[in-house]
C-alpha cells in the first residue's frame, strides 16, 4: 500500500492542465509529411540508410516502451541531415493470439464467446476491431514526432505479405526444415491453443508434493491425477536403494485394482528429490516424454484438449485437472496409498503468458520448424562480425538462445492470423504444402494459423519487398527492446538469412524497459501503467524524448523521471531565451568586418569539438553522451559564457551568435525535432525547414 500511495503522489503531478504544445507540434508534423520529407526520395542520390519500425500491435495503444523508438527517430533524422537516402518504414502487427485474446475478453463482456461464431465471421469481426484501432496507434507515433514514411506503411495481414510468408513456409517444407509430427506441446486448455516454448512463463508456486505408495516403492509427485497415464517408474541407475528393482515389474495397487508397472533406470532422476523414485507419464510431462522415447515406453493420454480427464481416468472422466487431483488423492487416502503430503513444496510451474492458467503439456500433431540448421547461420553471422549487437553484453543472451534452440511449434489453434497453407487429402491423409492455392477437391486446409512471430520474423524482408524497397535490404540497424531479442530479433536473423542469404540488418541495437517513476515494471495488474501520450500532452513530445535519452546508458532500464522531464522543460525555455536574444534582440547594424577576437576563436574551436563529439557518439549509438554534450555546451558555455561576453560587443559577435545557434539547432534536431524547427524558422536566411539542412562537417 505504501508503494501505491507513493506512486499516486507522483502521478498526481501529471494531468491537471493540458498545455497545447500538441497543436503546434501537430501542425509542424503535418507540414513535414505533406512536403514529403519523410520519404527516402528527399535525397535520391544519397547512401541508403534504413530502419524498420518494430510494428506495434495494430489494435493496442502505445505503451512507454514504444516511446523508446525515439532512438530510431534520432538515427533517422541524423542520417537525413547527413544527406543519406533515408527510410524509416512503419507497420502494424496483427499480433495473432494477443489480439484474439483481447477480442475474446470483449466478447465475454457481451456474454458471447469465440464458440458463438464460425471462423470467417470471427476473423472479420477481429479484422474490423483491429482496423478501427490502428489509427489510434499511428497517431500516437506521429505525436511523438516520428518521421516515418507513411506511404510505405504495411500491415502483417495484407495479401502481399501473406504471399511472402507462404513462400517461406513452402521453401522450408521443401528443404525438409518444416515437418508435421505429434509431440508434446505447451497447451493452454483455457485459450484452446498450443504455444512455442517462449510463450510459457514460469512461476514459483506452492504445489503439494504427494508421497504415494507404488507397490513396494514410494514415489513423490505433484501430479497424482496423471497416474492413469503412468507407463513406468524410474530411479537413478546409481541409486543403490533401488538396484534390485531396475528392469523388473512391480505390482501396484490402483483405484482400478492391481496393475503392473516397469521400473527403469534413467540419469534424469534426481536421487535427492522426494524418495528418489518418480513416475513416468510420457503423455503429460516433457521430461517423461523424452524418457519414454529413450526407453520405448507407451504413451497414454488421460487429459484432453478441454482440460478434462478422459475415459482412461475411469470415474474421474469429465473432471477438470484440479478437481481430479483432489478426487484421486481422496480415493488413494481411503485405500491407504498416500504416505504423506508435503504442503510446503514450491514448484516451478509453466503458465500461459496471457491467462496465467497452468500450461498443460499435451500430445498434439503440429507443424514444427527444425531450428538448429537455421540457428547455425544466425550464430555464425554474429561470431564472424558480419553484424554487431549493441550493447555487447546482449550477445550472450543471443548465443545462449540459439545454441540451445529446440524445434519451433508454429501451429496455433486460433483464427486471427495467417492460415497455414497446408492441405490434407481426405482419403490418404497425406499433407500437401502450397503457396496458398487449394491443390484439389480431395483436400481440406489445416485449420490452424501461424505463430504470429513466424510472419513478424520475416518482417524486414517482407515489408521491404512488398513496398518495392528492397534496395534498403539489409537495413542499417534493428532497434528494439531487449525483451524481445529471442522472440523476434533472433527469428528475423534466422529467417532473413535463410530467405536471402544475408542477415536482415547490419547492427542490432537494444534499448531497456521504461519503468514507473519508482523503478517498478509497469503492469496492468499493478495498476502503475503510465500512458506515454498523456505525458506528451502535458509536457510536449520534445520533452518526453529528451527525458528518455538524457542520463540513460543505451540498453539500460530506466525509471520514468519527472526530474528529467522538468529539466527538459527548462532546457527548452533556455533555448527560447537564447533564440530571443540572438534573433529578436538583434542589433540594428552589424559589423561588416569579421573581427575575430580570442573569445570567437575559442567558441569556434569548442563548436568544432562538440560537433565532432556528438557525431562520434551518434555513430556508436551513445545517445545519452551526445545529448549531454549538447546540453552542457548550450547552457554552460554558449549561454553562460559566450553570450554573456558578447553583450559588450554585440555587433561584432552577431555573426558568430547566429552561426552557433543554427549549428546547435541542427545538432539538436534529431533529439528535439519540434522546438528546433520552430526556432530555426526564426533565423535569418533559413531554408524551408530545418529538415533540409546539412549536418555540419566534421574535420577528421
Ligand atoms: Zn491461456
Image: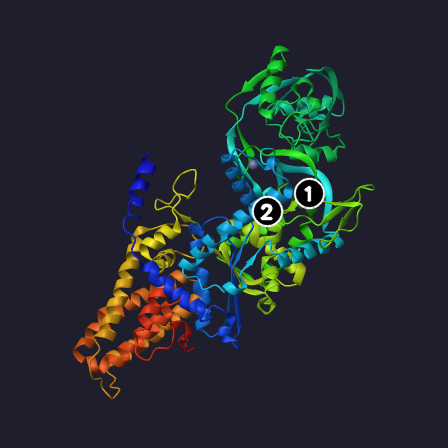
Q: Depth check: 522 or 606 in front?
A: 522
Q: Residues within 10 Å of mark 1 (few under 14, many from 20)?
A: some
Image spot of residue 640 (x, y percent): 22, 68
Q: Residues within 10 Å of mark 2 (few under 14, many from 20)?
A: few
For the image, the number of numbered tags is: 2
- For the C terminus, the image quarter is bottom left
Image spot of residue 592 (x, y percent): 24, 88
Query: Quick check: 205 left or right of 631?
Result: right
Q: Mark 2 or 1 closer to N-term?
A: 2
Against 482, is 38 above or below? below
Against 496, is 232 above or below? above
Against 275, is 349 above or below? below
Query: Quick check: 534 left or right of 584?
Result: right
Cα distance between the residues tagged 2 and 1: 16 Å
Q: Depth check: 562 or 13 in front?
A: 13
Query: Quick check: 570 left or right of 147?
Result: left
Q: Residue at x 63, y 25 (%)?
A: 276
Image spot of residue 251 (x, y percent): 74, 17
Q: Is residue 410 visible?
A: no
Q: Which residue is mark 2?
A: 124
Q: Depth check: 143 or 505 in front?
A: 143
Q: In which quarter of the view is residue 362 placed? A: top right
Please, what secondary structure does the residue beneath circle 1 have? Answer: loop
Q: Residue at x 70, y 23 (%)?
A: 311
Q: Depth check: 40 or 648 in front?
A: 40
Q: Is residue 342 visible?
A: yes
Amino acid at each position: 500500500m505504501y508503494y501505491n500511495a507513493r506512486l499516486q503522489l507522483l502521478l498526481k503531478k501529471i494531468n491537471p492542465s493540458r498545455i497545447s504544445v500538441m497543436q503546434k507540434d501537430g501542425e509542424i508534423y503535418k507540414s513535414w509529411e505533406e512536403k514529403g520529407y519523410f520519404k527516402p526520395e528527399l535525397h535520391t542520390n544519397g547512401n541508403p540508410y534504413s530502419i524498420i519500425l518494430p510494428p506495434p500491435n495494430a489494435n493496442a495503444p502505445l505503451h512507454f516502451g514504444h516511446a523508446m523508438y525515439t532512438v530510431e527517430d534520432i538515427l533517422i533524422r541524423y542520417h537525413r541531415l547527413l544527406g543519406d537516402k533515408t527510410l524509416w518504414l512503419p507497420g502494424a502487427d496483427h499480433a495473432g493470439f494477443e489480439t484474439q485474446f483481447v477480442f475474446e475478453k470483449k466478447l465475454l463482456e457481451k456474454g458471447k464467446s469465440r464458440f458463438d461464431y464460425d471462423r470467417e465471421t470471427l476473423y472479420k469481426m477481429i479484422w474490423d476491431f483491429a482496423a478501427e484501432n490502428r489509427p489510434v496507434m499511428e497517431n500516437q507515433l506521429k505525436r511523438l514526432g516520428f518521421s516515418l514514411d507513411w506511404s510505405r506503411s504495411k500491415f502483417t495481414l495484407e495479401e502481399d505479405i501473406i504471399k511472402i510468408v507462404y513462400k517461406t513456409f513452402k521453401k522450408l517444407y521443401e528443404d525438409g526444415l518444416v515437418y508435421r509430427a505429434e509431440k508434446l506441446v505447451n497447451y493452454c486448455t483455457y485459450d484452446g491453443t498450443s504455444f512455442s516454448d517462449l510463450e510459457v512463463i514460469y512461476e514459483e508456486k506452492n504445489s503439494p508434493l504427494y508421497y504415494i505408495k507404488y507397490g513396494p516403492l514410494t514415489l513423490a509427485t505433484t501430479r497424482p491425477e496423471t497416474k492413469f497415464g503412468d507407463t513406468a517408474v524410474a530411479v537413478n541407475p546409481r541409486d543403490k536403494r533401488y538396484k534390485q528393482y531396475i528392469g523388473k515389474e512391480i505390482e501396484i495397487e490402483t483405484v482400478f485394482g492391481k496393475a503392473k508397472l516397469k521400473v527403469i533406470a534413467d540419469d534424469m532422476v534426481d536421487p535427492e528429490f522426494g524418495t528418489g523414485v518418480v513416475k513416468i507419464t510420457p503423455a503429460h510431462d516433457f521430461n517423461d516424454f523424452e524418457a519414454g522415447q529413450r526407453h520405448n515406453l507407451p504413451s497414454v493420454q488421460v487429459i484432453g484438449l478441454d482440460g478434462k480427464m478422459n475415459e482412461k481416468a475411469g470415474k474421474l472422466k469429465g473432471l477438470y485437472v484440479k478437481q481430479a487431483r483432489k478426487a484421486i488423492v481422496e480415493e488413494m487416502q481411503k485405500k491407504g496409498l498416500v504416505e504423506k503430503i508435503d504442503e510446503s513444496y514450491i514448484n516451478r510451474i509453466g503458465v500461459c503468458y496471457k491467462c496465467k492458467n497452468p500450461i498443460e503439456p499435451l500430445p498434439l500433431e503440429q507443424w514444427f520448424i527444425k531450428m538448429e540448421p537455421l540457428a547455425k547461420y544466425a550464430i555464425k553471422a554474429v561470431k564472424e562480425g558480419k553484424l554487431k549487437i549493441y550493447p555487447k553484453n546482449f550477445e550472450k543472451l543471443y548465443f545462449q538462445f540459439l545454441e540451445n534452440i529446440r524445434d519451433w511449434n508454429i501451429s496455433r489453434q486460433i483464427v486471427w492470423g495467417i492460415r497455414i497453407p497446408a492441405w490434407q487429402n481426405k482419403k490418404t491423409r497425406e499433407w500437401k504444402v502450397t503457396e496458398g492455392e487449394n491443390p484439389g477437391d480431395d483436400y481440406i486446409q489445416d485449420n490452424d494459423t501461424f505463430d504470429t512471430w513466424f510472419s513478424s520474423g520475416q518482417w524486414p524482408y517482407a515489408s521491404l519487398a512488398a513496398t518495392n524497397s528492397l534496395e534498403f535490404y539489409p537495413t542499417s540497424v534493428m532497434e528494439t527492446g531487449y525483451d524481445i531479442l529471442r522472440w523476434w530479433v533472433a527469428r528475423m536473423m534466422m529467417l532473413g538469412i535463410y530467405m536471402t542469404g544475408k542477415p536482415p540488418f547490419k547492427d542490432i541495437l537494444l534499448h531497456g524497459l521504461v519503468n514507473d517513476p519508482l523503478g517498478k515494471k509497469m503492469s496492468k495488474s499493478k495498476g502503475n501503467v503510465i500512458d506515454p501520450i498523456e505525458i506528451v500532452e502535458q509536457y510536449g513530445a520534445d520533452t518526453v524524448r529528451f527525458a528518455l535519452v538524457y542520463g540513460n546508458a543505451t540498453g539500460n532500464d530506466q525509471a520514468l523521471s519527472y526530474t528529467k522531464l522538468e529539466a527538459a522543460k527548462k532546457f527548452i525555455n533556455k533555448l527560447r531565451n537564447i533564440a530571443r536574444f540572438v534573433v529578436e534582440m538583434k542589433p540594428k547594424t552589424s559589423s561588416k568586418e569579421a573581427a575575430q577576437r580570442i573569445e570567437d576563436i575559442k567558441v569556434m574551436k569548442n563548436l568544432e569539438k562538440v560537433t565532432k563529439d556528438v557525431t562520434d557518439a551518434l555513430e556508436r549509438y551513445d545517445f545519452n553522451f551526445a545529448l549531454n554534450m549538447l546540453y552542457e555546451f548550450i547552457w554552460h558555455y554558449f549561454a553562460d559564457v559566450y553570450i554573456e561576453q558578447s553583450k559588450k560587443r554585440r555587433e561584432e559577435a552577431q555573426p558568430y551568435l547566429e552561426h552557433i545557434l543554427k549549428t546547435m539547432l541542427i545538432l539538436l534536431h534529431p533529439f528535439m525535432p519540434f522546438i528546433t524547427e520552430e526556432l530555426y524558422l526564426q533565423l535569418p536566411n533559413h531554408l524551408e525547414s530545418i529538415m533540409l539542412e546539412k549536418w555540419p562537417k566534421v574535420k577528421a
